[in-house]
Amino acid sequence: MSKSLNGKVAVVTGASKGIGAEIAKQLASAGAAVVVNYASSRSGADNVVAEITKAGGKAFAVQASVSKEADVVRLFEETKKTFGPVDVLVNNAGIYEFAPIEEFTVEHYRKQYDTNVLGLLLASREAVKQFGDRGGNIINVSSVVATLAPPQAAVYASTKGAVDVITRSLAKELGGRRIRVNAVNPGLVLTEGTSGLGFDDAENGFRKQFEAQSPLGRVGKVGDIAPAVVFLASDGAGWITGETLSIGGGLR
């Protein structure tokens, strides 16, 4: 991989596994020093760091829950102390729960909004403070559910709809400060989390429906998402901001 991010410092939230882990690895392969943020899986984060350093890259792990303001402030303080001010923020941390409206609870709502929306805003605020005159990049990991709006996903899909709107709004607000803000919107991707929901089973009904509707006829892999994030973080995407790139095999 070309070293398109040489000398850059990147923070990836929720990077101990799944899409976030692969993004962290590929950012490091492109030359960035990467902060691997995790909320609870210390072992997973340590494994990601070990893989990056073994390949000759720079990385360290920081525990912080993005839903807690003090944790987010500390995450960026530790980043600056170790690697210097951040250049690239990937807001990947997110959770999803599916439930019919009859089972809706305030806890169900707050858990998802606190991580998927509040956490993204807190991390973006702290990153912008460090970007300074040189500018920077924010890449938000959204989802195709923001537009597909599947059943039993009113809360989760609405958090990702909010992410898309925040992406466009911040792009307009921050463009004059040389800060670009974009989003990638994955479709169904096989990760530890989706496997836990049974989507690694080729006979799973939701998976079969997704594959049948997708022009490319398959679910995604983490390696399908990370290269787009690396591109959006690079100078090659220097005139791209406020975009939401759907990566779901063509499913609309």
Image (cartoon, helix red, strand yellow):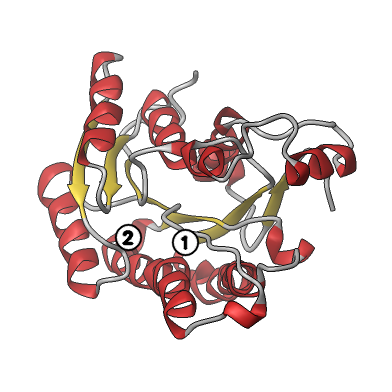
Task: Give the residue type that dot 2 points to.
Answer: Phe
Nearer-N-terminus badge (1/2): 2
Alpha-carbon distance for marks 1 and 2?
A: 8 Å
Nearer the observer, 231 or 19: 19
Q: Is residue 219 left or right of residue 166?
A: right
Q: Are marks 1 and 2 in contact (CB under 8 Å)?
A: yes
Q: Looking at the rendered structure, which numbered label has been put on residue 179? A: 1
At 47% across and 72% down in the image, what residue appears? Answer: 117
Where in the figure is residue 148, as x and y percent of width and height? 78, 62
What element does badge 1 sit on?
strand
Q: Amino acid at mark 1?
A: Ile
User: According to the image, label 2 marks what residue?
Assistant: 131
Q: Quadrant of residue 122?
A: bottom left
Density class for disc 2 (Cα within 10 Å; few <14, some 14-19, many ≥20) is: some
Q: Name the residue furthest left.
A: 81
Quadrant assignment, res 213: top right
Q: Check the image and report above or below for 196 versus 73.
A: above
Residue 212 left/right relative to 184: right
Where is residue 20? Give x, y as percent. 43, 42
